[in-house]
Amino acid sequence: MPDNHFKSLPWTKLRRGVPCYLPTAAVGARVDAQSPALAVMADFRRFAPVTIAHDAALDEANRLMTLCNVHYLLVGDEQRQLLGIVTEACTKGHRPLATAHAMGIRPRELVAGNVMINKHDDAEVVHLKDLAEAKVGHVVATLKELGTQSCLVVEHDESHNHVLCGAFFLAEIERQMGGESATEEIAHTFSQVVSSLGR
């Protein structure tokens, strides 16, 4: 039964001959080291992250990132458990070539699961409850200590399972800080990133 307490909103029709443009990507507000940490967190509670299958081809991963205007994809299984994360650095340049060479296969045979940054139970994560009073500077210091370009944010459900609710990405933080380098000591190699995530 409809609720008769609500009145319909004003509405109209698109005018013929008047262009209607697709939205441009939103630009994050300018921040500095004293800004709230949550201002630079990719909040998966508000905007569902883009996901990809473990066995999806790398070309598909690149197309999906371009289409959705994102720089990373989450890899999950059929039970919606997180398996890993695929970034642009994982799918382009020398890293996939090196992975294919190590596996003895051709680069076009690689799938997302071959190049993803593995996520294990002992991976370093930040808990949402610890971010209430945190600043952007704390996030950058954490990424520096972990030696990684990104860090996941979790909370717990009623069964004490980890629930992924967000992530921090150094590149995005630097964009929101106006392009200035947040730190010069963050690790850049694939092996260092994987190591920091508990591989």
Image (cartoon, grey):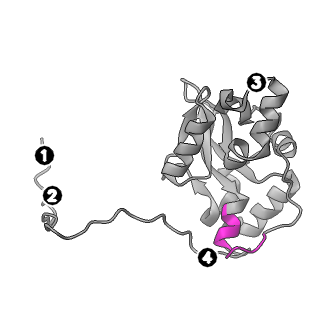
- The amino acid type found where label 2 is placed reads Phe
Residues shaded magenta: 172-181
Q: CA distance from mark 1 to mark 3?
A: 59 Å
> Could you tell which of marks 3 and 2 lies nearer the N-terminus?
2
From the viewer's perspective, is the residue at label 4 or at label 1 nearer? 4
First in sequence: mark 1 vs mark 3:
1
Q: Secondary structure at mark 1?
A: loop
Q: Secondary structure at mark 3?
A: loop
**The quadrant where residue 177 appears:** bottom right
Pick whichever, 60 or 82, lies toward us. 60
Query: Residue 105's mark?
Result: 3
Nearer the observer: mark 1 or 3; the answer is 3
User: Is disc 1 surrounded by few (<14), some (14 to 19) or many (20+) residues within 10 Å?
Assistant: few
Secondary structure, mark 4, is loop
Spatial CA span between label 4 and label 1: 43 Å
Return the residue at label 2: 6
Seen at 53% across and 55% down, the residue is: 69
Q: CB under 8 Å between callouts 2 and 1?
A: yes
Q: Is residue 19 above or below residue 72?
A: below
Q: CA distance from mark 4 to mark 3?
A: 44 Å
